[in-house]
Each structure stands twice: as C-alpha cells, then as structure tokens.
Amino acid sequence: MRLEKVTVKNVKLVEKDGIYFLEADKVIFFRKNYEKIIRHLKFQLVEVTTRMLTEYRKDKVPSFVLKIGERLYFSRILYNLSMENSEILLMHKCYSTEHTCKRLSSASDELGGCERVRNYGCNIEKYPWITIGCETFNTLKDALIVIECSHFKEA
C-alpha cells in the first residue's frame, strides 16, 4: 500500500479531574483502494511559564497552549494538527455567525480595534484581556482562538 495523505482532525479539548487533554484523530489515507486508518491521539497539557513558552517558540516545537486566566497549559503536538473544524473553534466568540465582536478590527484600541487582530493572533500569553483561549504555533496552520475575552462586545 502506498501512503497518500496524513491529516489530524476532530480536535477536542477535554478536562478530567483538573487535568487538560487535547484529543484528536490521526487519519492515514492509502492510495490503493482508498483505505484509511484512524488512530486516536491524546496529548496531556502541563502548566508552564511564559519563559518556557518563549523557548518552545524559539525551538520551533509544534505546540498547543491553553490559557485560563493567568495560567498557561502546554503540550507538544503534531505539525499537521489543524484547528479547522475542531470543537474548540466552535467556542470562539470573536467571530461567528451568532456573535461578531465589535472590536474584530485592526484599528487602534482608541478607535475600537483589537491588538490580537493587529498582531495576527500570536503569543496568547501577551494578552491579559484573553481570559480563556488557546493557540497553536510552529504548526502547518497556526491559530489563536479566543473563547472568552474581557473586551468582547457583541455587534
């Protein structure tokens, strides 16, 4: 069998007994007979410091970060893990058909814009007003998802 494509999808954030996990499905497609194999993946998140995240960013480690208040949780992930079509993305309040944030603009804060948008959504630890959110970095498609934000204003 010849390998055709490998994707990682169906990403979920799970909490059990105060421990956070990122769960996903690794789908391996083969050219012959269009067969596919699904492997379930589980990444445990550990609490980290801002300094540790800076090192992971420099070392080009494919990573997932969960921010809850002032706490940061981290896990190494696969390079091709994508947040597109993930359950986590459905919790994103800044941009959806039901909740479009009035601040979803690259304008200055004084003009009602959002710093996260101006900075292309990276370095979640630098935004104290993101109360719950997550970020992937050093991946095929990096993402920053704001789940809860003290600046959120419905349109």
Image: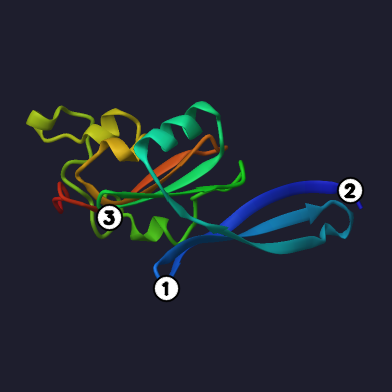
Which residue is disc 3 drawn over? 93
Q: Position of residue 45 (x, y in %)?
A: 48, 55
Instruction: Report crowding for label 2: few under 14, some 14 to 19, many 20 or more residues within 10 A (C-alpha).
Output: few
User: Which residue is pictured at 49% across the width and 50% down the height?
Assistant: 83
Label 2: state its secondary structure: loop
Which disc number belongs to residue 17?
Answer: 1
Label 1: state its secondary structure: loop
Q: Position of residue 105 (x, y in %)?
A: 22, 35
Q: Is residue 108 above or below residue 121?
A: above
Q: Is residue 125 above or below residue 20?
A: above
Q: Which quarter of the figure has residue 16?
A: bottom left
Between label 2 and label 1, give the one nearer the viewer: 1
Which one is in front, 21 or 25?
A: 21
Q: Looking at this view, name the residue that lies furthest to the bottom.
A: 17
Dot 3 amino acid type: Lys
Q: Position of residue 59 (x, y in %)?
A: 55, 28
Is residue 59 shown left or right of residue 91?
A: right
Give the mark nearest the N terminus, 2 or 1.
Answer: 2
Which disc number belongs to residue 2?
Answer: 2
Give the mark nearest the N terminus, 1 or 3.
Answer: 1
Instruction: Report crowding for label 1: few under 14, some 14 to 19, many 20 or more residues within 10 A (C-alpha).
Output: few
